[in-house]
Image: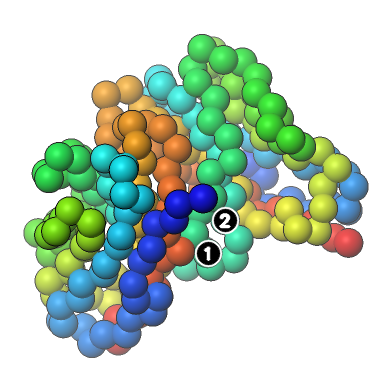
Amino acid sequence: EPEVTQTPSHQVTQMGQEVILRCVPISNHLYFYWYRQILGQKVEFLVSFYNNEISEKSEIFDDQFSVERPDGSNFTLKIRSTKLEDSAMYFCASSGPVGEKLFFGSGTQLSVL
Amino acid sequence: SQQGEEDPQALSIQEGENATMNCSYKTSINNLQWYRQNSGRGLVHLILIRSNEREKHSGRLRVTLDTSKKSSSLLITASRAADTASYFCATDVDSSYKLIFGSGTRLLVRP
């Protein structure tokens, strides 16, 4: 079965630093998503992306966050100035039609020190 | 309560028994999906049930949907130790570009 791949699997950074999390969605999918999960808590929606623009974003997705699809295959999440509370597992997902099943990557564990 | 709340929060059963998890939601939906997450890993889609469907089966999984009560249940029959994981419901809300996940049920199947 096709897979969503995410890199790196672990990222450690200092508070205030910028991080870029990378994802390669399934090639013929049209909708792309970022979710995050703080340890032991629920999976929280951050942003959805379609046709090279943000479709929807949550309250968590403030000005410190941005997404980009720079080259037609990669999908990135940038956090401009990380905070301690940004420590979480970040999941990328993609889907064909909107609202249909999501394919998730295995996640990037971000630790902000 | 939030959109997508599962109960129980945790469930421990013996191998071979059935496991039932429930999900309640608040707004109208296009569909409801169930996902599984092994510890620290990505989520894997299990089954999707549309708002005009009442029941759906996939292998040992049976999902029901009651839109009048805004609730769904996931039944895993003849459970195995390998079914040990967290299970999440997720709702596709009308006119939305996102799935909203519930808080999850942690299932432990004892060998």
> In front here: B44 or A29?
A29
> Which residue in the structure is indicated by mark 1?
B41
Q: Say which amino acid is labelled 1.
A: Arg
Q: Position of residue A110 (x, y in %)?
A: 34, 75
The mark found on residue B37 in the picture is: 2
Rendered position, B66 above or below A27: above
In contact (CB < 8 Å): disc 2 and disc 1? yes
Quarter location, residue A66: bottom left
Query: Element under label 1?
Result: loop
Can residue B76 be seen at all in this image of the molecule? Answer: yes
Q: What type is the residue that disc 2 sits on?
A: Gln
| SS for callout 2 | strand
Tell me: B77 left or right of B66.
Answer: right
Chain on which label 2 sits: B
**B103 in relation to B4, above or below:** below
Seen in the picture, residue B23 relative to B83 is either above or below; the reply is above
The chain letter under disc 1 is: B
Q: Position of residue A33 (x, y in %)?
A: 30, 49
Locate residue A51, reporting x and y percent: 15, 40
